[in-house]
């Protein structure tokens, strides 16, 4: 949509709607990300509209007060403010506008939106659902399209796509809810064939919520129940092994037809108190998790991780951005753990830190993503 009101008016600033919150278990993390993105968008360049999606699915016009969109402690996670005015989206052939609805008042038009920056994590946001809505409304948006978002969210289909492209992944077992109910013995046999320990994960989750490290068959039922609290479909994955290093690489689209670019490689070093990189280790400030940016790796290994990261980005047909997570195994081989099409995006998150170490500061990274989205059309491409 053109960024001007009529033919005689001077061009207005592009209007950017930052969309956050959502119905998934990662609601709070999305709020944290939004606070950082809102603070980074230059008001001299963009007209910014903060839009929150409450846990019950209501859309509200948020205040834009970034000070409250932060984690204050384990029991003080940010939430979308449901007392704010309710928002609705209208669309016709020429205009996608926003209206605010307050009790006892006529709807107030907010004008059209040029691009949506959806910093939603997890199902009902990062999984292609919001992307499909934007496509239907013919509104440009930051990040991957419907298919890539859906594939990146579902760890099962992500592995299928990566394997089909010849990219390395860990062995796994997929457990749909119906199979666990009807053939638990068969599932247990397949899991035991992987060898313990294993990791039991919600297939379409993130932020390490609902993940358990299972050391024996006796622990499997409890881990399955925990994973199914968040997703009826569960993925059980082989352990990468003692001594495996967890490394990550960011990928960014380029303008025009130039190939995607890879950031420097970083490493996550988790404190011994944590069995793995769980929610507390990721997000709570008192946790002793070290992020080495860049990672201490031989140049040849770093180059191979960057190559594989771009290959994964292309295999899933991502757009805009992605973070690709790897395990560097003790024998020197690499496997892809997962690809995140909307990674954590605070200035201290791994994706922005990798790009800052690559020479692209946080505010410039946010601006680049908005400009990429404004350049890219909606529809089949």
Image (cartoon, helix red, strand yellow):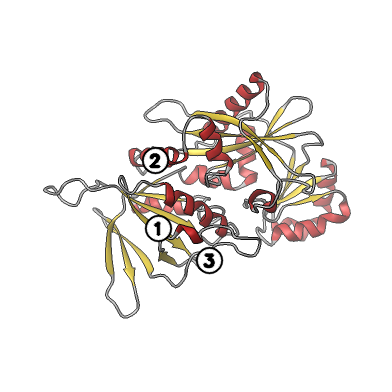
Which element is circle 2 on? helix
Q: Categorize mark 2 by other alpha carbons within 10 Å: few (<14), some (14-19), many (20+).
A: some
Residue 234 in view: no
For image coordinates 77% across by 37% down, the residue present is: 240
**Mark 1 or mark 2, which is nearer the start of the sequence?**
1
Compared across the picture, whether 277 is left or right of 147 comes to right
Which numbered circle lies on residue 50? 1
Quadrant in which the C terminus is drawn:
top left
Compared across the picture, whether 264 is left or right of 96 comes to right
Which quadrant of the figure has residue 92? bottom left
* Residue for badge 3: 55
Relative image position of residue 34 (x, y in whole percent): 48, 53
For image coordinates 75% across by 46% down, the residue present is: 276
Relative image position of residue 131 (x, y in whole percent): 44, 50
Give whichever of 10, 133 is nearer the camera. 10
Which numbered circle lies on residue 189? none
Per the model, the C-alpha gap separating discs 2 and 3 is 28 Å
Task: Please say if 306 is above or below 110.
Answer: above
Relative image position of residue 236 (x, y in whole percent): 74, 47
Give whichever of 174, 245 is nearer the camera. 245
* Residue for badge 2: 367
Residue 250 in view: yes
Q: Categorize mark 3 by other alpha carbons within 10 Å: few (<14), some (14-19), many (20+).
A: some
**Tag 2–tag 3 contact (CB < 8 Å):** no
């Amino acid at each position: 949509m053109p960024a001007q009101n009529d033919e005689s008016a001077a061009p207005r600033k592009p209007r950017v709607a930052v969309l956050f919150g959502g119905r998934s278990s990662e609601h709070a993390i999305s709020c944290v990300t939004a606070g950082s993105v809102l603070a980074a968008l230059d008001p001299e360049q963009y007209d910014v509209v903060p839009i929150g999606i409450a846990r019950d699915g209501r859309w509200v016009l948020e205040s834009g007060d970034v000070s409250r969109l932060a984690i204050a402690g384990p029991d003080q996670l940010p939430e979308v403010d449901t007392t704010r005015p309710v928002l609705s989206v209208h669309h016709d052939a020429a205009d996608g506008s926003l209206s605010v609805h307050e009790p006892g008042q006529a709807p107030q038009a907010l004008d059209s939106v040029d691009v949506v920056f959806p910093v939603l994590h997890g199902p009902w946001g990062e999984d292609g659902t919001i992307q499909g809505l934007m496509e239907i409304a013919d509104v440009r948006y930051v990040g991957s399209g419907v298919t890539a978002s859906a594939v990146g969210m579902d760890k099962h289909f992500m592995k299928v796509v990566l394997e089909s492209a010849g990219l390395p992944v860990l062995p796994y077992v997929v457990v749909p809810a119906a199979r666990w109910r009807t053939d638990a013995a068969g599932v247990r046999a397949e899991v035991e064939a992987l060898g313990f320990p294993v990791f039991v994960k919600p297939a379409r989750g993130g932020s390490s919520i609902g993940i358990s490290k299972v050391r024996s068959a006796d622990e499997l039922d409890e881990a399955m129940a925990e994973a199914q609290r968040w997703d009826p479909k569960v993925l059980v994955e082989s352990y990468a092994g003692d001594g495996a290093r967890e490394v990550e690489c960011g990928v960014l689209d380029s303008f025009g037809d130039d190939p995607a670019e890879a950031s420097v490689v970083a490493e996550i070093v988790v404190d011994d108190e944590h069995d793995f990189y769980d929610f507390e280790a990721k997000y709570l400030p008192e946790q002793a998790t070290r992020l080495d940016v860049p990672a201490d790796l031989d140049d040849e290994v770093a180059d191979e991780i960057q190559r594989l990261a771009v290959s994964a980005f292309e295999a899933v047909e991502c757009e805009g951005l992605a973070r690709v997570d790897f395990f560097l195994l003790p024998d020197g081989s690499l496997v892809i753990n997962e690809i995140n099409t909307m990674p954590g995006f605070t200035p201290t998150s791994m994706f922005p830190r990798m790009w800052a170490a690559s020479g692209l500061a946080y505010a410039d990274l946010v601006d680049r993503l908005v400009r990429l989205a404004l350049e890219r059309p909606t529809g089949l491409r």
